[in-house]
Image: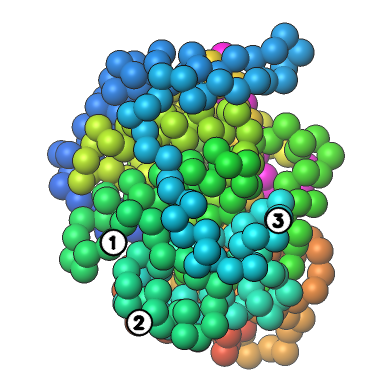
Amino acid sequence: SSSSPPSRTEAERLLVRDGGDDDDERHGRDVAARQGWRGRAIAALLAIGVGVLATTTWTADGGHASALGAGLSSIRDVERDSRASAMGDWQSAPRDWHIVGFASETYEDVAKLWYYRLQNLGYEYHHIVAVDDEIYAKLTRAGLRVIRAPDFTMVPGADLGSFWNFRLRYLLGELKRGQNVLLSDLDVIFAHHYDPNVLFNEVNDEEVDVFHSLGTAWPKEAHDKWGFSLCMGFAAFKATPATKALLEAAVQVCDKQGDDCDDQTIMNDLYLNYLQISWKPTEKHDQRKGVSHNSLIPITVKTLANLVPRLDVSRLVSSSSKLDPMLCYGHVHHVDGGNWAVAPIVEKVGASKVEIWKRFHDECLVSATANDAL
């Protein structure tokens, strides 16, 4: 296939400038270390890949049967039994999907904003994973659905590699018990109630295993090849054998990287270099569908694109016109076809996230082009 990126969709053009980075924490890492990511990750996969991927068998008609447990004793399952009693009735009720956010004490305010927005939209299957005792106690007292992260505590000032490792493990544990998961960063602002079970199983999407919102220009290799990258800050994972195999591989690569682990880099590297995903546009919402060319994990991935636009707030303007809420990014609306949520690009500081939340709530933020047309 050609090395030049495909023509960009409208959603992809909304992203930050070419060569930019949407995440100061990732961008601030040692450049030389980051440049070695792909080679080390793929080398690690080649070393362990047979042991991981050969544990999945695929039937002749394209279906699949899982035997993922064999030979994977080095990967610890996320323990759930020890905390089952603390989860309460909300966790015991069967749900097709769980919407999950992660919070430390410094993100208390934005965690509550995220949670209450989902609640106000009518969701009943979202919860927060608390990565320290302080935030767990505060959110529990506030009556939110919250669980204490099993076997992990986020240490203030620590490298985020340990957190991203835990997040991959938590996700894998949920998938292995058959639970579909929508991961969401806390600064994602939901605007509409779409039912994930309907949205992720539309006609021709039944075979899609993973849905990603768009990243910006990180990691650069994926951006240069595809014209976009895939974000882990809003991503939906069906509990399929292919998805479990993908996460098994991601966890093992992350383990190899130690403190340098970056889940978004790993996932894009796997899609790009190991699975050799090829993309084609779809008819709705500027989305793209990607299909693996690696027969060991014949996974199908889809971008959410315009449904969850990634927004550079500095490129938005506050409209003085009285507009339909569906036209204002992040405002609650009740029209299918509009944004499900928006993902603003903001530094990883709790106060900054709250400030951005308030702007989207109080103002009608639109693109400069849209404002000129009003």
Q: Nearer the viewer, mark 2 or mark 1?
A: 1
Residue ID at (20%, 46%): 259
Q: Inspect the image, locate mark 1, and give the three-letter code of the amino acid beneath it.
A: Thr
The spot of residue 345 in percent (x, y) is 43, 65
User: Could you tell me which quadrant the C terminus lies in?
Assistant: bottom right
Q: Earlier in the sequence, mark 1 or mark 3?
A: 3
Residue 299 sits in which quadrant?
A: top right
Asked if the stretch drawn in magenta spans residue 284, the answer is yes
Residue ID at (21%, 41%): 258
Q: Is residue 305 left or right of residue 266?
A: right
Asked if the stretch drawn in magenta spans residue 7, the answer is no
Q: Inspect the image, locate mark 3, and give the three-letter code of the amino acid beneath it.
A: Arg
Whether residue 2 is situated above or below residue 170 in the rendered picture: above
The spot of residue 230 in percent (x, y) is 49, 44
Please name the residue that numbered disc 3 is placed on: 95
For this orientation, the residue located farthest to the right is 203
Asked if labels 3 and 2 touch by Cβ distance under 8 angstroms, the answer is no
Please name the residue that numbered disc 2 is placed on: 351
The stretch in magenta equals 283-295
